[in-house]
Amino acid sequence: MEGAAERGVLAVLVVLAGLAACGSGSEIIEGPKNVTALKGSEARFNCTISQGWKLIMWALRGTVVLSMTPSEPIITSDRFTSASYQEGGNFISEMIIHDVQLSDAGQVKCSLQNSDRDGSAFLSVQGVYAGNSEEEHLESSGGDKAPTD
């Protein structure tokens, strides 16, 4: 698995090097919004971009996890996929995080190659508790038990 991640990072670097000389007049019109997701579910983030972009990069907790060129996404992990839409002459990039984990909680960022502006949001992840009583919930979340009479 480590080899696949390294190949993915290498692919992103090759694309970045190839596009480094290409300027882009596009900009992020609307960045992603904060999302709260349950552990094990999906989280979706949208970024609206004006036409003319060359490379979109999605980062989770400071690490690029998904990149897109106008012709295709560069997927480095099956947990991070993309969808795209056209709306009113603008491009909407959607990053989908599959099987959200507690460790995924943190900043999500959408950025463009050769642009100093980005869009960011925060992913909050909630765990699922097995018990139904308040006492079990408090124990699961590390709280103290309430005194009983």
Image (cartoon, helix red, strand yellow):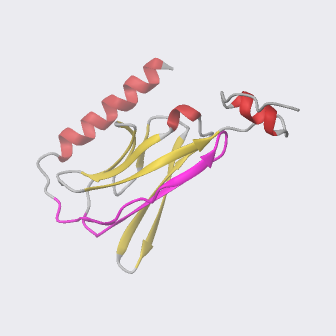
Above or below for 88 versus 30: below
- The residue furthest top is 2
Above or below for 56 versus 15: below
Q: Give residue 63's position: percent from left, percent from top.
A: 36, 35
Q: For the point 13% across and 57% down, which residue is it?
A: 23
Classify residue 22 as left or right of residue 45. left
Above or below for 43 versus 17: below
Q: Give residue 99's position: percent from left, percent from top.
A: 63, 39
- The residue furthest left is 21
Q: Give residue 104's position: percent from left, percent from top.
A: 51, 36
Q: For the point 31% across and 37% down, which residue is it?
A: 12
Q: For the point 38% across and 23% down, which residue is it?
A: 6
Q: Give residue 100's position: percent from left, percent from top.
A: 59, 40
Q: Which residues are magenta?
A: 24-52
Classify residue 147 as left or right of residue 10. right
Name the quarter where the C terminus is drawn. top right
Residue 17 position by quadrant: top left
Q: Is residue 68 visible?
A: no
Q: For the point 44% across and 19% down, which residue is it?
A: 3
Of 68 and 38, nearer the camera is 38
Of 50 and 118, nearer the camera is 118
Classify residue 130 as left or right of residue 90. right
